[in-house]
Amino acid sequence: MLIPGIPRLLVLAFFLLLPFVGNLYLVNQFTLLLVYGMFAMSLSLLWGYVGLLCFGHAVFFGLGAYIMAMVTKQMIPGMDGILSSSLAGILAAVGFNALFALILGWFLFYGRLSGPYLGIVTLAISVLVERIFINWYYTGGYNGISSVPALSFAGWEFSDPRHLYLLVFVLSLCAYLFLRRVVNSPFGAIISAIKHNEARAESFGFHATKYKIKVFAIGASVAGLAGALFAAAAEFVSPTELGFKMSTEVLIWTALGGREGLIASFMGAVTVKLLENYLSEALSEYWVLIIGFIFLLSVIFFPQGLFGRLLENRNKGWSVTSPQRSKTKKEGRVC
Amino acid sequence: MLAGDGKPKHILEVNGLRKTFGGLTAVENLDLRLEYGELRCIIGPNGCGKTTLFNLITGNLKPTAGRVIFEGREITAWPVPEISRLGIYRKFQVPSVFEGLTVYENMRIPYFARMKPSILGRSSVSRNEHQEIMELLERVNLAGQAGELAGNLAHGQKQWLEIGMVLASRPRLMLLDEPTAGMTIAETKITADLVQEISESSNISVMVIEHDLGFVKEVARKITVMYKGSIFREGTYEEIQADKDIHDIYLGRHR
């Protein structure tokens, strides 16, 4: 078997070196791939680690993007000057999403929704929000908002694609480290217990609903961050970003990559989007068929996803608590 | 019902408990008192409401009428986690462990219930707690399986693991629903010894639902027989054994 950390290091090295070797087209392309990857990781937290099948996750991505666009284009009355900076946009996107998810989660999870029902309701919310933005004249309706300003912090503008890439890379890395910290924390152990047996977890004194709402808010915030970066990097946002199609796509990325792993989900997004970029050129609409076929095969033959085994080492960080512990691990577990 | 020192005499008191599901009455006018440190077995034919009684005590079901009082405090229809945190922990009838986690990870979960579960902290238990987990695993014969996925354990081992997790929760009252189901005779004996040892070596009060009369004979000083949702008899094993009516209800001949 491979040494556990190596594939992950290779992924890291690849994305770190890319701007120094790739041409500008590639760098631009990969900036968006990083953003999609971050988005997929946030879904992986909800779906893979807590078992919340959220079918409308793009709502958070799209709202993050819209908020970023509206803040930095000074479309929100009363928010100008420092309040219309990129940082303000990002904070607003993350903060609003956290709040929105807390409220939405309160209704969803105290409404005892789970499994397919949760999927259906979140799907409906996604379609609903998409309709609102399509019909909302102020945000450009179907065309959305274009000419979103590039990212700039304290007067330093990220207009060079390579700089922008590196910034998004660092933020993606931070998002990954943050999410990894969360799933490896006691909080993460409890949500995993809730995923595996909710009734049992409640009988040990955990309010499953409260944990679900919290984790929902964390996932939504990270999706909001990804959305905000998307708006700035793509320089536009449209209702597509928060609707049904995007919600489905992110599910496919995550499932294909391996929903129970953060990097696996990330790589799922990168892989599918890359394939899309090249196959849609060569095959126009038929690439969707290919993706669908790959997806089917992966569900049947790789239920853990294409990268689930390669990139994730569940033992690591998950459970090692003491020297004795890691010893029993090695003896006890057949991989 | 307070004793002289102001401490309630009974750790658990159930008064006039009633639970109906539509037209079906599962528990009817049930009164029960459990003393501190007592080890009580509850027996009765299938469908007589034993598990429903547990569900009503732990809050998994809300009673139609009646009251549940734990250590002098009314806890009727409290949310499940709140009742657990008072110290009532149960082993479910179907062994309920976290199958996707290892045995050791399962054992850690109750410890996280006692700390403020930080979102960014490391998910580790202290050295003492680690020691405690290993001792508990020793007690439930799973020390060698610490790294095994709980889902891979045999049925009986899952039962032990769940008992271990309940013990790790430091219960004041332990509810065991058919702890020996699916066990061999030898395993049943080990479990009976374990339950007895728990009851004798600590001040944990224990209520056990059990069908295995060998087990009941071994552990219980007092037995409650339930029938059609109510208490039918209470007494020692010998009294229960000698009671002709009880034989009849088990054979379906009563009334």
Image (cartoon, coloured by chain):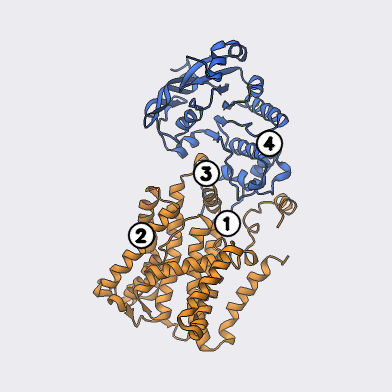
Chain colours: A orange, B blue
Residue furthest bottom as drawn: A23
Kind of element beneath mark 4: loop
Of residue A242 and residue A83, the one placed in the foreground of this image is A242
Q: Which residue corresponds to the image point at 31% horizontal and 79% vertical from the top-left?
A: A143
Of residue A46 and residue B47, the one placed in the foreground of this image is B47
What type is the residue that disc 3 sits on? Answer: Ala
User: Dot 2 surroundings within 10 Å: few (below 14), some, or many (20 or more)?
Assistant: some
Q: Which residue corresponds to the image point at 42% horizontal and 30% vertical from the top-left?
A: B75
Judging by the rendered image, the residue that carries numbered circle 2 is A100
Whole-Å distance between the Cαs marked 4 and 1? Answer: 27 Å
What type is the residue that disc 4 sits on? Answer: Val
Numbered badge on residue B140 = 4
Q: Is residue A125 visible?
A: yes
Whole-Å distance between the Cαs marked 4 and 3? Answer: 20 Å
What type is the residue that disc 1 sits on? Answer: Asn
Numbered badge on residue A201 = 3
User: Dot 3 surroundings within 10 Å: few (below 14), some, or many (20 or more)?
Assistant: many
Q: Residue B228 at x, y = what percent?
A: 46, 22
> Horizontal placement of A219 versus B239: left or right?
left
Whole-Å distance between the Cαs marked 2 and 1? Answer: 25 Å
Contact between labelled residues 2 and 3, with CB atoms less than 8 Å apart: no
Q: Which residue corresponds to the image point at 65% horizontal and 59% vertical from the top-left?
A: A316
> Horizontal placement of B137 versus A217: left or right?
right
Q: Residue A2 at x, y = what percent?
A: 72, 67
Q: Report the mark closest to the observer, 3 or 1.
A: 3
Contact between labelled residues 1 and 2, with CB atoms less than 8 Å apart: no
